[in-house]
Image (cartoon, rainbow, N blue to C red):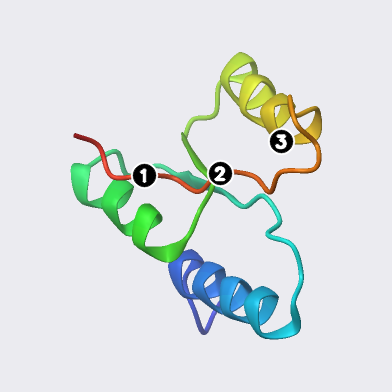
Amino acid sequence: MPNKDGYTACKEIRRWEKKHGYRRHPIIALSANVLGDVYAKCVEAGFNSYVTKPVEFKELSFTLTNFLDPANPSKPPDLMKHKK
């Protein structure tokens, strides 16, 4: 995206969902940057999960399965939370 980054795009999607009464959709961040601040930025932006690059197929598959086949389909997907 030439004019915005993924954090901005995610924030805009979350605002749009809320404004129009749409259920939260899963948004997974993919980043080659593994620094601690990236995780915090993902939490603040409203991502549901985070996968580092290079992407490992098993990790991505596990992450996607949690959203595509949730234990409780009527519940919106959980957002990322700050690490304690």
Vertical side of 17 occupied by 25: above or below? above
Vertical side of 48 occupied by 34: above or below? above
- Identify the amino acid type marked 2: Asp
The alpha-carbon separation of the residues under discs 1 and 3 comes to: 16 Å
- The quarter holding residue 7 reads bottom left
Instruction: Point out the tag, 1 or 3, that comes first from the N-terminus.
Output: 3
Taking the image as shown, residue 32 lies to the left or right of residue 47, namely: left
Q: Residues within 10 Å of mark 2 (few under 14, many from 20)?
A: some
- The quarter holding residue 68 reads top right
Image spot of residue 66 (x, y percent): 68, 27
- Give residue 81's mark: 1
Res 1 visible? no
The alpha-carbon separation of the residues under discs 2 and 3 comes to: 9 Å
Image spot of residue 16 (x, y percent): 66, 81
Q: Nearer the viewer, residue 55 or 13?
A: 13
Residue at 74 percent of width and 62 percent of height: 23
Q: In the rendered structure, are the residues bearing label 2 and label 1 in contact, judged by CB atoms less than 8 Å apart? A: yes
SS class of the residue under badge 1?
loop
* Residue identifier under label 2: 78
Q: State the quadrant of the N terminus.
A: bottom right
Taking the image as shown, residue 39 lies to the left or right of residue 55, namely: left
- Identify the amino acid type marked 3: Phe
* Residue identifier under label 3: 67
